Amino acid sequence: MFVEENMPKVAVIMGSQSDWPTMQETTNIFDDLNIDYEVHIVSAHRTPERMISFAQNARENGFGIIIAGAGGAAHLPGMVAAATTLPVIGVPIQSKALNGMDSLLSIVQMPSGVPVATVAIGTAGAKNAAYLAAQILGVTDSHIAQAITDFRKQQADAVIESEAHLND
Ligand code: RP5
C-alpha cells in the first residue's frame, strides 16, 4: 500500500458491533483507495469516558478525519465533534424501529459552531463517508485525488455500459 509520509489516518468509529455491517462499506472503499484507517467501537452511552478520551486524543494519535456511525439515539458523531476540532463525518445507521430517521435527525441537526458532515442513511451514507473523506484528503494528496478521479470515470463508464445492454 502506498501511504504518503505523515499522511493522517482516518478513524472509523461506531457505537456498537451491530453497526459493523454498514460501516464495513466505508472500510471496503478505503481498502480500494489505499487509505490508512483504524476501526474502533466507541459508544456514547455505554462507554462515555472512552468516547471523550478518543476524541480529545484523536489528533495526537495521528487521525485527520473521524467517521462516526451510530443508530437510534445517535449521539456519538455530535459528541465526538464537540470534543475535537478534527472534521467529523456522521453516518446514520438504518435502525430497525424507525428505519434510520431517528439516527439521521440525531446526527444532522447540530447547533451552530459544532458541525457534523452528515451523509445518507445506511450503506449509501457509509460509502459516501469514505468518498468524502478521500476527497478531503485529496486536497493535499495527489495520489488520493487521482484515485477518486479514476473511480468517477469507472462509475460513469458503468452507467454508459448498462445502457448499452438495454439495447442488446
Ligand atoms: C447505538 O445504538 C449504536 O450505534 C447502534 O446503532 C444502536 C443499537 O446498538 P446495539 O443495541 O445493537 O448494541 O449506540
Image: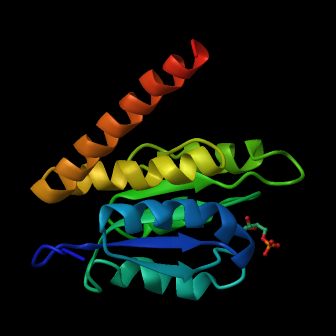
Frontmost residue, 113 versus 150: 150
Residue 89 position within the rendered picture, expressed as x and y whole percent measured from the top left: 45, 55
Vertical arrangement, residue 113 with respect to residue 157, above or below? below
Residue 153 position within the rendered picture, expressed as x and y whole percent measured from the top left: 30, 35
Frontmost residue, 48 versus 100: 100
Name the quarter where the N terminus is drawn: bottom left
Name the quarter where the C terminus is drawn: top right
Q: Residue furthest right?
A: 97
Tell which quarter ligand 1 is in: bottom right
Residue 130 position within the rendered picture, expressed as x and y whole percent measured from the top left: 42, 55
Vertical arrangement, residue 95 with respect to residue 165, above or below? below
Quarter where residue 37 is shown: bottom left
Vertical arrangement, residue 5 with respect to residue 131, above or below? below
Q: Residue at x 35, y 39 (%)?
A: 154
Q: Is residue 109 visible?
A: no
Vertical arrangement, residue 71 with respect to residue 48, above or below? above
Q: Residue at x 21, y 56 (%)?
A: 144
Name the colouring of the figure: rainbow
Task: Tell how many labels.
Answer: 0
Quarter where residue 137 is shown: bottom left
Quarter where residue 87 is shown: bottom left
Frontmost residue, 34 versus 163: 163
Q: Which residue is drawn at 75% across and 42% down?
A: 101
